[in-house]
Structure formats: C-alpha cells, structure tokens
Amino acid sequence: MQRITGFGTILILCLMASLGLLSRAAIRDQANPQASPSAPAASSGTDQDVQGLNALRQGMVEAFNKGDIDSLIGYLSPSAVVIWQSGEVNQGPEAVRQYYKRMIQGPDSVVKSVSFSPVVEGRHFYGNTAVSYGSLNDHLILRDGSDLPFNSRWSATLEKDSSGRWVLTCFHVSANIFENPVTNMVARRVGLWSGIGGFVGGFIIGGLILRRRRT
C-alpha cells in the first residue's frame, strides 16, 4: 500500500511539473527527502571561532571610535549590507565609507562625533555563519551641540571565508522610535514653542479685546 501511495505521489508531482507548477528540484526533494540539505544546528562555536569574532568586534570598535574608516571597512564582506538608525541602506564597503564621510566628515555633516561600545547579548554559530545581537551603547554629539546618548539595538551576520577569516556580511542597527534622545529633544522644543506661541497669541487677543472695549 505504501508503494502505491508513493508511486501516486511521484506521478502527481510529475504531472504538476509538466504543467509548470513545480520545478524538477522540488520533485527530486519530494521523491527523496533524505537528499534535501538540512540547515546546520545552532551551536556556541569553537574557541577559535569565538576568539575570531571577539577580535573582529574589538577591531571594528577601535577603528570606528578613532575615525579610521579605512580599517573599519576592511572588516566588511565585499557584498556587506548595513542598515543605519536613519533607515538608510548601504551595500558594500564603499557605500559605508561615503555614508560615514557625509554624516561626520562632510561640510554639511550633522554629527560632530560618535562613539559606541557594543555589548554582545547573544551569539549563535551555524557552521561557517554566525549571528550576534545586543546593545550598541552609542553616543552622538551633533554640530549644534546636542548631546545624544543612545542605546541602540543591533544585530549582525558574519561569515567565515575560505581563508578562515571572519567578515561582517550584514549589520542592522535601530533605536526605539518612541523613546530616544531625538524624540525627547523634539518634544521639548515643540513644548517650548507651543508655550511661546500661546503666550504671544493670548497677548495679542487680549490687546484686541481691550482695544475693542475702548472703542
């Protein structure tokens, strides 16, 4: 009975493929499930891998805090993707370099200085791939003198290349959109200008009412 059922399944799959509803690869995987590759199980990694990632993280932190962008992008994969708090997406090391120059070093830059001290809260290895996440402890000082201590969240994907060297392939950093120094600063400024506007508006209206009574 199992043979008939198995044969019937393969026959249906072949019919679907002939109609363009299924690929040959899908038929092969369904006919022989054991041939389908399975994702490696998560692990805590070997001591060598852990030391390699720690060295990469330390090197990136030192390069970033020193403003050494050339050393920083040396830790990135050629196809690396970085997503910043602003939502801007950089693809490749050169895009990261241009973003850094525009935001910090350019004549119209918004940020005067920035530093961070990332903390790893979790890390998992999947063969030659690793996924880490944690808090960034980033600190920004803007050109207008605003001091913005953030605590952004980050996640990173890293891969070990053919030489055994770990490189960053994806980095995503984000902040709490409801509670962060920027939103608090905007709220304070809005409240200040609202108060000034209310005072001026009340003064003008009061003057108009007084003038009307006199006339």
Image (tube, rainbow, N blue to C red):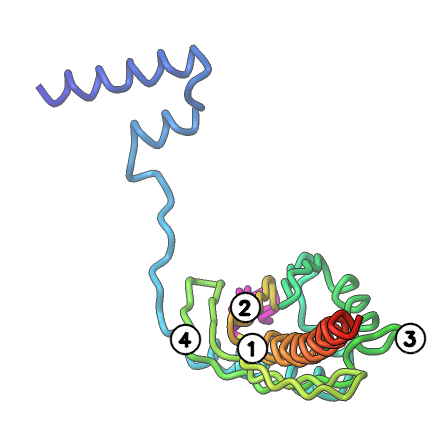
Residue 213 horizontal side relative to residue 9, left or right: right
Q: Which residue is mark 2?
A: 177
Check whether the beta carbons of the residues at disc 4 and disc 1 lie within 8 A of each other: no
Give the magenta part as a residue range: 153-167
Q: Residue at x 77, y 88 (%)?
A: 145
Q: CA distance from mark 4 to mark 1?
A: 23 Å
Residue 91 horizontal side relative to residue 42, left or right: right
Task: Please tell me whether mark 1 or mark 3 is closer to you in this view.
Answer: 1
**Callout 4 amino acid:** Gly
| Mark number, residue 180 | 1
Viewer-side residue, 214 vs 37: 214
Check whether the beta carbons of the residues at disc 1 and disc 2 lie within 8 A of each other: yes
Q: Give x and y (percent) for residue 9.
A: 24, 19
| Mark number, residue 107 | 3
Q: Residue at x 16, y 19 (%)?
A: 5
Q: Which residue is mark 4?
A: 122
**Callout 1 amino acid:** Asn
| Chain-order first, disc 1 or disc 3 | 3
Dot 1 falls on a residue whose secondary structure is loop
Viewer-side residue, 167 vs 185: 185
**Callout 2 amino acid:** Ile
Dot 3 falls on a residue whose secondary structure is loop
Check whether the beta carbons of the residues at disc 2 and disc 4 lie within 8 A of each other: no
Quadrant placement of the C terminus: bottom right
Task: Please tell me whether mark 3 or mark 4 is closer to you in this view.
Answer: 3
In the rendered view, would you say 144 is above or below 125? below
Q: Residue at x 43, y 62 (%)?
A: 127
**Callout 3 amino acid:** Pro
| Chain-order first, disc 3 or disc 4 | 3
Residue 34 horizontal side relative to residue 155, left or right: left
Predominant secondary structure in magenta? Answer: strand
